[in-house]
Amino acid sequence: MRSLTAALALLLTTSTCQGFVAPTSSSHNLHQIITPTTTTPSSTQFNKQQPLSRLSVATDINAVGAPGTADLPWSELGFEFRPTKSHLRMTYRDGKWQEAEMVESPYINVHIGATALHYGQACFEGLKAFAHEDGSVNLFRPDENAKRINRSGHRVMMPEIPVETFIKACNDVVKDNVAYVPPYGSGGALYLRPLLFGSGPRIGLQPAEEYTFIVMVIPVGDYYKGGLAAPVDGLIVDDYDRAAPKGVGAAKVAGNYAADLIPNMAAKKKGFPICLYLDAATHTLVEEFSTSNFIGIDNENKKYITPKSPSVLPSITNKSLQTLAKDEGMTVEQRDIEIAELSTFDEVIACGTAVVVTPIGSLTRFDENGEESKYQFTEDVGETTRRLYDTVRNIQNGEIEDPHNWNYKVE
């Protein structure tokens, strides 16, 4: 586990960020970049014998405050929007990032000519903060989200957010909303949604001169009640493509998700809660699920196989699971996966920030005549799926060693 100060000091000495940069600062004065209101620590504590097991709140952790003190039904949280105290907002203007501010209103005024509205100049991220048993709050791999939002922004010509500025923004918005961090033992987390978009007006097709960066936070529970869902049945999509081979599939831009709405809703009407897309060029290679990366598990040969494609969004969850699989001695392969190879997998997983992993029970494909072919996997959660899920969740919750220093302590 890294403290924020130590992590930012390292980033400041190793960062190669170029181009658009925020006002410079050292690791000693980073707190001057963003100055949110500090939540007063609460003395509230939960007894571990209460019905919600292992639920606990600390009284004072580095003056950050106590997580889980907001009046919310912690054991009943789903993955949906809930109002919180504030969001962080920062504007890029005149060639530099302005000082960030905490804003309590959930609304934002946007120019009618904003490039985000007309030309889709917008990208976003998703990450989580978790309460640990000692009362501290930890962000999971925010440095990776910082790097990815910059790759996405670069693809649609938006300014770079220095990694240290991104992490500091996440730290401070969590600190300002610490009461909304689900308490340890609840199974929940504070979900952060950083969003970067063109807010300046342009009518001709060109990048804006002004950009807005916000980080909103939402307390969420397990995506599926109980943590790890029973395997779900997926539909292989042939009538639509998620992304073109040389398009923006590898960027987390807003329009990628709008393109999935019609096929996703159509699949659900047929009884399939998740869609699997194929490569747009040939429709012979596996690419990714609607909002998740694809993983195939070959238990006999101890292999973890995931597609390598310029159209697939690099998942931070997938990257983490690959590392854990290697730690276990599995062979990790990133390569093309032919459709026919689906029949060789013992387990198939959809992975992403919201759910961590979704086990796939089967994948169905319909031909042009409506004839069905089906690839069947495990009826229950597979042993490798369960083991990888438990390991990453235990690291996130601070329940086992964090050997790769993925947790960043909020301070």
Image: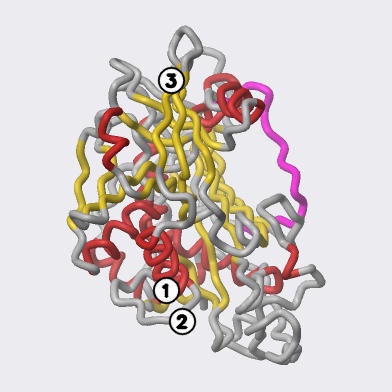
Residue 141: give x, y in percent of width and height. Answer: 40, 63
Residue position for label 2: 399
C-alpha gap between disc 3 and disc 2 = 41 Å
**Residue 113 colored magenta?**
yes
Between 253 and 388, the one lying in front of the other is 388
Q: Residues within 10 Å of mark 3 (few under 14, many from 20)?
A: some
Q: Residue at x 44, y 46 (%)?
A: 350
Q: Secondary structure at mark 3?
A: loop
Residue position for label 1: 395
Looking at the image, residue 198 lies above or below residue 322: above
Looking at the image, residue 134 lies above or below residue 286: below
Looking at the image, residue 314 lies above or below residue 61: above
Between 22 and 196, the one lying in front of the other is 196
| Left or right side of 351 for 325 | left
| Left or right side of 367 for 193 | right
Q: Residues within 10 Å of mark 1 (few under 14, many from 20)?
A: many
Q: Which residues are magenta?
A: 101-116
C-alpha gap between disc 1 and disc 2 = 6 Å
